[in-house]
Image: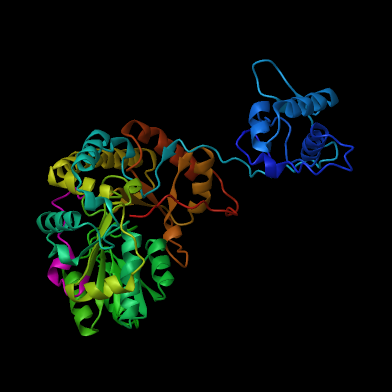
Amino acid sequence: MAVSQTNLAWATLLAVGPPDGGRRRLHDRLAHALRTAIRDGRLAEGAAVPPSRALAEELGCSRWVVTEAYGQLIAEGYLSARVGSATRVSWSPDTAPPRPRAQRAPARPPIRYDLAPGLPDLRAFPRRRWADAVRAVTGSAVHYDLGLPDPAGHAVLRTTVAQYLRRSRGADAHAVSVSVCAGVTDGLVRTCRALRAEGIADLAVEQPGWGRLRDAATSAGLRVHPVPVDHDGLSVDDLARTPACAVVVGAAHQFPTGTVLSAARRARLVRWAREVDGFVIEDDYDAEFRYDHHPVAVMQGMDPSRVFLLGSVSKTLSPALGLGWLVAPVAMTPVLREANLVAAAPPVLDQLALATFIDRGWYDAHLRAARRRFRSRRDLLVRTLGAQVPEGRVAGTAAGLHILLHLPDGTDTRGAVQVAAAAGLRLADLDDYRAPRSAEPALVLGYGNISDTEIPTAVALLREALRSPTTSPPTHTAQLSHEDR
């Protein structure tokens, strides 16, 4: 035990035994106790022992006893003392076994360029205005805001989110039906628990899709059924052939294909939910970033009694904030709360800061600037890919923060991901989001967390990785940075 403090219970650490037939004086017994502690390793080499006055007070003896004991151990080489410095242990047990060195895994090369999906432009986080919002609510919060938080979220943020979703996303949202959560994953877990409490045991998910959605569903005790996605979005006909009575769908911008659920499919999906007496869970992924026209309205407005709506600021501001929302059918809200009795809302001051950030118009201003920036960056990435990777076919460009790069048959995308990583470029293989693996090779390229000036170099590294001969798949695939939304 390395000891460098002087506030230990030294009377307990040092077993200063009783006199041995009157033959051993107190300073000899103290020296013996210190020597034993050093030999046993309880006082490690380099550890400071207390000043003599402090130890004397701790042990209830005279200072002379301590200075005599210290002097004896300094003479024996167990302690060392320098003017102006603490007296320290200068000996360690010769028989102490050497500490085994930890086996370190080979260091991975640093990632210099990030083309994996999942992050917004972290460089553009509105630090000043967010700090202003935090400062404002810290000064204005009333005393009861600082108590135990409402598990459903602070009423101010729930009201603000409901108003925002009504005006910007076409939702039928009200404060009573909004719950504040830590992100989309947290919201989905809560929803799945509520569905399980209502007797629903089977949930459909999109294929390909985000793996953490499947994990969230299974963690809540639901059986998961993958349903294919085509150019019009989720196949409702295939969904109808499953035993599922609930489905998770990315209607505005499906991950990772980038497709938008067509109007006909939306209407058919709502009819399906009514026919099976089930529910649609709408993951409003990347919905704020649409470049060909205004963002598509949410499905939840078509039937708020059948559609849950999940959203967060992880892709618009930062996943570090851990702030999201869940809009539930009003009839399901009591079930939702009862099924998640131990669910914790995000910190209240953060909730109030987000409400202030939205109410003052800063969130809308940030989104407008972000759309312009991402549209320009998407165009640059597509042009650069066309020039340097002409064999690729780009898809999913209408919205979001990622695109698909379809590649010729036989391209070893997994090998390309590994080669690129060794060169400092992070990529994502489409097969990481679908099971079983497909014969159609493609990469999922995110452009949120990369600067415009880095794109030409990143694409050049991608081109070299695709042209590098690969002979075998890697033995380990790194977990992609696609954090909670």
Q: Residue at x 70, y 43 (%)?
A: 13
Residue 453 higher or lower than 420, as above or below: above
- The one of 435 and 31 positioned closer to us in this rendering: 31
Q: Quadrant of the C terminus?
A: bottom left
Task: Answer with left or right where residue 465 lies relative to residue 248.
Answer: right
Residue 238 higher or lower than 478, as above or below: below
- The one of 470 and 179 positioned closer to us in this rendering: 179
- The one of 129 and 428 positioned closer to us in this rendering: 129
Q: Residue furthest top?
A: 83
Q: Residue at x 28, y 72 (%)?
A: 336
Instruction: Tell me which corner region of the image, top left, top right, bottom left or bottom right, holds residue 364.
Output: top left
Residue 165 higher or lower than 465, as above or below: below
Q: Quadrant of the N terminus?
A: top right
Kindly report the secondary structure that dominates the magenta region of the rendered protein: loop
Percent x, y of residue 183? 32, 57
- The one of 145 and 467 positioned closer to us in this rendering: 145
Whether residue 87 appears in this view of the structure is yes
Whether residue 102 appears in this view of the structure is no
Residue 392 higher or lower than 308, as above or below: above
Percent x, y of residue 214? 40, 67
Percent x, y of residue 73? 81, 28
What colour scheme does the image use?
rainbow
Q: Residue furthest front?
A: 22
Q: Residue at x 13, y 64 (%)?
A: 174
Q: Which residues are magenta?
A: 289-307
Number of numbered discs visible in the structure rendering: 0
Task: Answer with left or right where residue 352 lies relative to residue 386.
Answer: left
Percent x, y of residue 236? 26, 75
Q: Is residue 109 covered in magenta?
A: no
Task: Answer with left or right where residue 40 lies relative to residue 416.
Answer: right
Instruction: Tell me which corner region of the image, top left, top right, bottom left or bottom right, holds residue 361.
Output: top left
